[in-house]
């Protein structure tokens, strides 16, 4: 009799525990999935860039090629150095995935594509690592070092300003984009700045159009990097205009103040060109 009583009690306890576990599991399964936003999903920017309006050579009444530099340390340019996803990371990942081609900086005409080894080298260099197999034999493997995005302090832009005869308006197209790295010694003293590579902008537009750019005071991320460049939502200074000697302003004017003054004069000259069309 006692044996039957204890057996029944034991079975009851097992059923109670199982029921409690089932209830607990059901409660956990019914918890809503946390969403770290006010909407479950954001609209993706995975879209192609809007194509440029076709233009014939005969429609170009006037044109001027200029180079300018964006300083990412300026407040308006801080999205270029975003901690979450800086522009240099987007370009390097696109190059690794064969979505964007990188070109050498030996000239500004996109004549020499970088090889895979050169691309790995500019990404931070290459280390040779010994690899040992089970039999003790050693082989050497090339491992690329990561590029520190914080070292990219400027971007160089090559652009073409032109007057469309059909609309009698001034327009601009960005031709190329080059990140500039600042290199320092072990004491943190700046040694030099140099461009890493050139990117042909039109060939990279689809990548840039699918990548969100940080927007001040509005984190909805509805603006792409192509929007930033097309709407010219950045501050920059002119560092060169096309000339017969192919010289930059720094090669002509040794002091920074003169470079800024002349660069501003070049920029105002371009802006006034359209106004001059309507002066009589």
Image (spheres, rainbow, N blue to C red):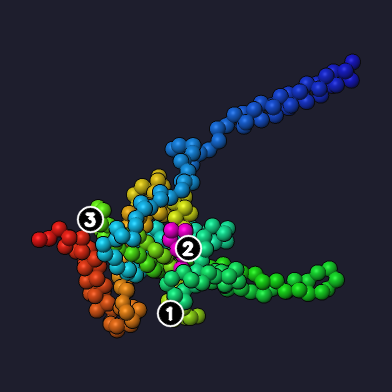
The residue depicted at 50 percent of the width and 69 percent of the height is 103
Q: Where in the figure is residue 220, as x and y percent of width and height?
A: 40, 45
Furthest residue in direction top, as rendered: 1
Residue 176 position by quadrant: bottom left
Q: Where in the figure is residue 19, as x and y percent of width and height?
A: 71, 24
Q: In this view, does 58 lie above or below 250?
A: above
Determine whether, in the image, residue 113 is placed left or right of residue 56: right
Residue picked out by circle 2: 88
Whichever of callouts 3 and 1 sits on the residue coming sooner in the sequence is 3
Q: Is residue 267 visible?
A: yes
Could you say which disc has been placed on residue 192 in the image? 1
Magenta range: 198-203
**How far is disc 3 from disc 1 in space, using C-alphas?**
43 Å
**How far is disc 2 from disc 1 in space, using C-alphas?**
19 Å
The image quadrant where one finds the N terminus is top right
Furthest residue in direction front, as rendered: 58
Labelled pair 2, 1 in contact (Cβ < 8 Å): no
């Amino acid at each position: 009799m006692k044996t039957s009583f204890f057996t029944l009690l034991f079975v009851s306890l097992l059923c109670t525990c199982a029921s409690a576990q089932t209830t607990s599991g059901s409660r956990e399964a019914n918890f809503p999935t946390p969403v770290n936003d006010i909407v479950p999903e954001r609209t993706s920017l995975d879209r192609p860039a809007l194509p440029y309006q076709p233009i014939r050579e005969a429609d170009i009444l006037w044109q001027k090629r200029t180079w300018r530099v964006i300083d990412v340390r300026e407040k308006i340019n801080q999205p270029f150095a975003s901690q979450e996803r800086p522009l240099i990371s987007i370009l390097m990942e696109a190059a690794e995935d064969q979505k964007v081609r990188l070109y050498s900086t030996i000239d500004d005409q996109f004549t020499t594509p970088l090889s895979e080894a050169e691309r790995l080298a500019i990404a931070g260099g290459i280390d040779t690592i010994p690899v040992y197999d089970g039999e003790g034999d050693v082989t050497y493997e090339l491992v690329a070092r990561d590029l520190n995005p914080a070292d990219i302090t400027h971007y160089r832009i090559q652009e073409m300003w032109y007057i469309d005869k059909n609309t009698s308006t001034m327009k601009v197209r960005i031709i190329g984009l080059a990140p500039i790295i600042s290199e320092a010694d072990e004491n943190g003293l700046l040694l030099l700045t140099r461009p890493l590579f050139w990117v042909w902008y039109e060939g990279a537009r689809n990548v840039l159009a699918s990548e969100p750019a940080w927007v001040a005071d509005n984190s909805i991320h509805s603006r792409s990097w192509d929007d930033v460049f097309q709407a010219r939502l950045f501050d920059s200074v002119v560092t060169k205009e096309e000339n017969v000697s192919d010289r930059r302003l720094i090669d002509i004017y040794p002091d920074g103040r003169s470079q800024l003054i002349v660069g501003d004069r070049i920029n105002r000259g371009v802006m006034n060109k359209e106004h001059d069309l309507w002066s009589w």
